[in-house]
Amino acid sequence: MKKFRHFFRRLCALCASAAVGAALLTPAWAAASDAQGGFSEQVQAADAVDRAAALGLIPPAAGDGGLPARMDAPISRGAFFACLIRFIAAQQRCDAVSFSQMVCYDWAERAAGEAAPAFPDASAEDLGVAALSLLGVVRGRGDGEADLEAGVTRQEAAALLARTYQAYGGAPFSGLPASRFADEAAIAPWARESVEAMCALGVMEGQADGRFAPDDLCSCEECLVSLVRLYETGPISQKNGTVAPLFSYRQYIAMLEAREEQARKNKTGLWETLRVVSRYATFSRLEPCAPEEDALSFLFIDSSGAMRSVPGLGLCDTGLGYCSKTLQLLSPRFSEDGTTFLCAVRLDRAVPSRSPACPGHEAGTYQVAIDVRTCRAQAVRLGD
């Protein structure tokens, strides 16, 4: 039981840390909802980066999970894992950090004192790797290490993609046509079924010379193309509306409440300072227990079973998953039909633009409307 309490305390602390906050992204499923139409099943390599970005699969440039500068360069295992956890979160209509937290919390609840699994060479703060391990996606190399800086071979990529598909509800593979490659004998027995499954689904394909090249390193481009193809062509996919939630609304709420209880007890971490409830979703504002910490987080917990962050309410997205406490939230409420969250937001200082997707805003008061389904925000500056 001590091990369980230790793991849960560590989870609560990590949920509040800036290191975890830095990994928060716009919910992948929300970005995808506006970009689904007219997309060819045969995803071309030239489309991979833009499409993956629209789906929210690309991790931040900084840190071990950052992608290489060149798309044709080999991708590291750490970067591949960072894309995978974002992909599964997209299928669950969550942001990567909220989903990773839920996976770890759910395991801790059911662990009955069992020690948390961990890779000796992985950071204890990387909830994404921990979540992938608990979901059975990442099993480590033969020496038990995650080996995050090493490359990913094509047959390893096939195995990881197959486990990823099954982690969010994809059926076990059976009855698929066998692939025929010139180097079929070189494919390891443990990877053969995954290679056949990913090729049968059109997620991966052989080389021009008829080989699969199982030991060649997977490039960043191949990783993104494969994930986009899996989203587009997988029978179980959020695109088709065929993915069932892994966790319920009550489970997400229970995680928030347990995390808050631990934060108040230890006087560190995040606690809830506002909750607004509608029939479709619950809005939660979180603030740090320590008054000297300057960070606000905003969450929507969907009644169907999903949780995602809304960085800066669409006005002051720092890219770090939180914003300054100088942001003032006024008159928060849901529309009568519960599908739109409405509020006024006061910015005491101007927010510079981070990218075309994150435009800057002048200081002042804004009327904000957020679509509960997509978490897309529209803001109109009010006259002074």
Image (cartoon, helix red, strand yellow):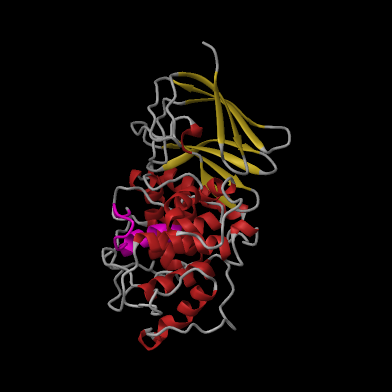
Q: Could you tell me which quadrant the N terminus lies in?
A: bottom left
Identify the residue shown where x is 41% and y is 83%. Answer: 190
Q: Position of residue 138 (x, y in %)?
A: 40, 69
Q: Quadrant of residue 73?
A: bottom left
Identify the residue shown where x is 27% and y is 77%. Answer: 143
Q: Is residue 27 visible?
A: yes
Q: How many marks?
A: 0
Residue extending farthest to the top is: 384
Tell me if residue 352 is in the magenta stretch.
no
| Residue sitting nearer the eye, 151 or 216 | 216
On screen, residue 369 above or below 96: above
Identify the residue shown where x is 38% and y is 51%. Answer: 59
376 lies left or right of 76: right
Q: Quadrant of residue 368?
A: top right
On screen, residue 76 above or below 262: below
Q: Position of residue 53 (x, y in %)?
A: 45, 49
Residue extending farthest to the bottom is: 185
Identify the residue shown where x is 52% and y is 64%. Answer: 230
Tell me if residue 71 is in the magenta stretch.
yes
Q: Is residue 2 visible?
A: no
Bounds of the magenta span?
A: 67-85
Q: Position of residue 90 (x, y in %)?
A: 52, 54
Q: Position of residue 192 (x, y in %)?
A: 44, 83
Q: Quadrant of residue 182?
A: bottom left
| Residue sitting nearer the eye, 376 or 269 | 376
On screen, residue 290 above or below 161: above
